[in-house]
Image (spheres, rainbow, N blue to C red):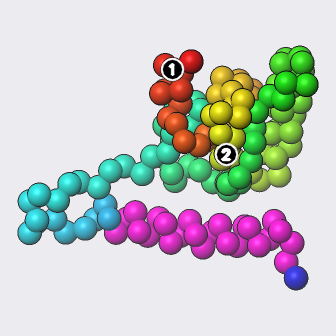
Amino acid sequence: MPTRREFLLKGTAGLAAAASSRIAYAANANTKNDKAAPKAAAAVVETVLGPLDVSKLGFTLSHEHVCFVPHEAGDRTAAAAKMVTKLKEAKAGGVDTIIDLTPADAWRDVRFGQEVARKSGMQIVVCTWRVADFLTHY
């Protein structure tokens, strides 16, 4: 029986190949006969540090909670240092991107995510709102 990591690596490679072939197909679709057809949008995902081409996502964990600072943590600086250490370990283990699914109404802190992303080198995608929208609302 494969380990979780082996399963995810094999499964992610297959999913990435399927997704990239669909994106390539959409980008190269013949639109000569359909003048109203829109051009294919660039394959970009919004991270806490700005837009990123999907080809640079690498190995991605799709359900994590990085942008959450528990109230009982008390010391935000210590919490950030601990998270940076954990993210650097994950990066060293082959993880390139994390999708953070902490909801906006559950103390998600995108600025915390930006801080730990910069310090750790990890790419972080947050759910539900674009980062720019979040930063202008709060």
Secondary structure at numbered mark 1 = helix
Please state which of residues 15 and 131 is positioned toward the viewer in this rendering: 131
Which circle marks residue 58 in the picture? Answer: none
- Farthest residue in the bottom direction? 1
Residues in magenta, as a range: 2-25
- The residue under label 2 is 101
> Is residue 115 found left or right of 51 in the rendered image?
right
**Could you say whether the residue bearing mark 2 is in a helix, strand or loop?**
loop
Q: Is residue 18 above or below residue 52?
A: below
Which amino acid, mark 2?
Answer: Leu
Residue situated in front as seen by the camera: 53 or 112: 112
Q: Is residue 85 visible?
A: yes
Name the amino acid type tagged 1: His
Between 1 and 131, the residue placed more toward the observer is: 131
Q: Which x, y percent locates residue 4?
A: 83, 68
Residue drawn at x 69%, y 27% as measured from the top left? 109
Q: Residue at x 89, y 18 (%)?
A: 74
Residue on which the image places disc 1: 137
Residue at image point 52% right, 36% down: 129
Residue drawn at the location 86% of the way across and 39% of the way down: 86
